[in-house]
Amino acid sequence: MEMEIKIFLDFIIKNRIYHSPKSLIWYYKNQLFKDINFKDKKVLDIGGGAGLTSFYAAAAGSNKVDLIEPYGDGSDSLSIKKFNIIKNNLKSISNKVYIFNQTFQTYSTIEKYDVIILHNSINHLNENACINLLIDKNSYEIYKNLFFSIYNLLNENGIIIIADCSNKNFFNSLGIKSPLAWSIEWQKHHSPEVWIELLEKVGFRFTSLVWTSPKQLRKLGQVLFSNQIAAYFLLSHFIIHLKK
């Protein structure tokens, strides 16, 4: 598996798929997928963009990875180009990754998964409902039903991994865009506690919450900034793991 991960890393470096490949792999190993064993697992990657998390999961030992990404529904065309570069050239890994160009709501399968990933995509399942989640009962029920659907796709003791930015952030409190990530629309985000409470109502069991640090700083950043206070002044980015 380590050899496959190295092959994947070398490929994305050579083809400039990601701006900081070594930091990305460090982030996968030490934060996003810490303590996750992908060997012989079936994985569902919801809203996985260019598929980097999907291909990593395949390189780390998964026997099948299904990626849902509605490329024709507002996604950056660069994402599908990057996906195809990897898919068409890294056969030892990519032959385990399958793409579904659709939304999660239209996805239908008889598969059961061991790991389901929503990496910076939970708020995009239904953006309007996400914005109104805490003030509108119908919006709350929409997300509750989405989580029921995800719950039913998991095998017993399956794991759901969610990463996103909390709206409890220094820059949001000032009512301004984050200079660290101008694209963040704070109104479309919620704290990890909001998601955990809703997921637990569906039946998930909370296992861990991690506040992430800047990938490029790796271990030093993890020591200095992987806490809620530091995150508040950075991107307020978190990772939660829950089990079925």
Image: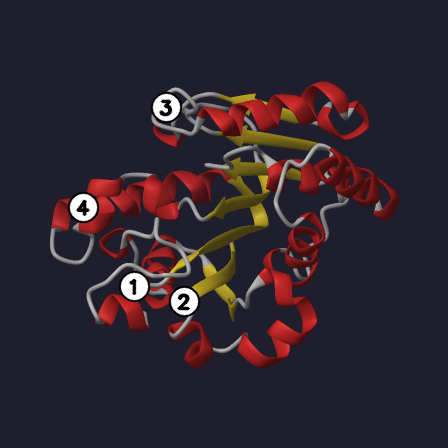
Q: Nearer the viewer, mark 4 or mark 2?
A: 2
Looking at the image, is mark 2 or mark 1 earlier in the sequence? 1
Do the CB atoms of the residues marked 2 and 1 lie less than 8 Å apart?
A: yes
User: Disc 3 marks which residue?
Assistant: 106
Name the kind of residue labelled 1 in the image: Asn
Q: Which mark is residue 236?
A: 2
Query: Seen in the image, is 39 located left or right of residue 109?
Result: right
Looking at the image, is mark 3 or mark 2 earlier in the sequence? 3
Where in the figure is residue 47, as x and y percent of width and height?
Answer: 46, 36
Query: Seen in the image, is 162 located left or right of residue 63?
Result: left
Q: Which mark is residue 139?
A: 4
Res 73 seen here: yes
Residue name at image x 66 percent, y 61 percent: 34
User: SS of the residue at dot 3?
Assistant: helix
Residue name at image x 42 percent, y 81 percent: 229
Q: CA distance from mark 4 to mark 2?
A: 24 Å
Q: CA distance from mark 1 to mark 3?
A: 28 Å
Do the CB atoms of the residues marked 3 and 2 lie less than 8 Å apart?
A: no
Query: Seen in the image, is 155 located left or right of residue 46?
Result: right
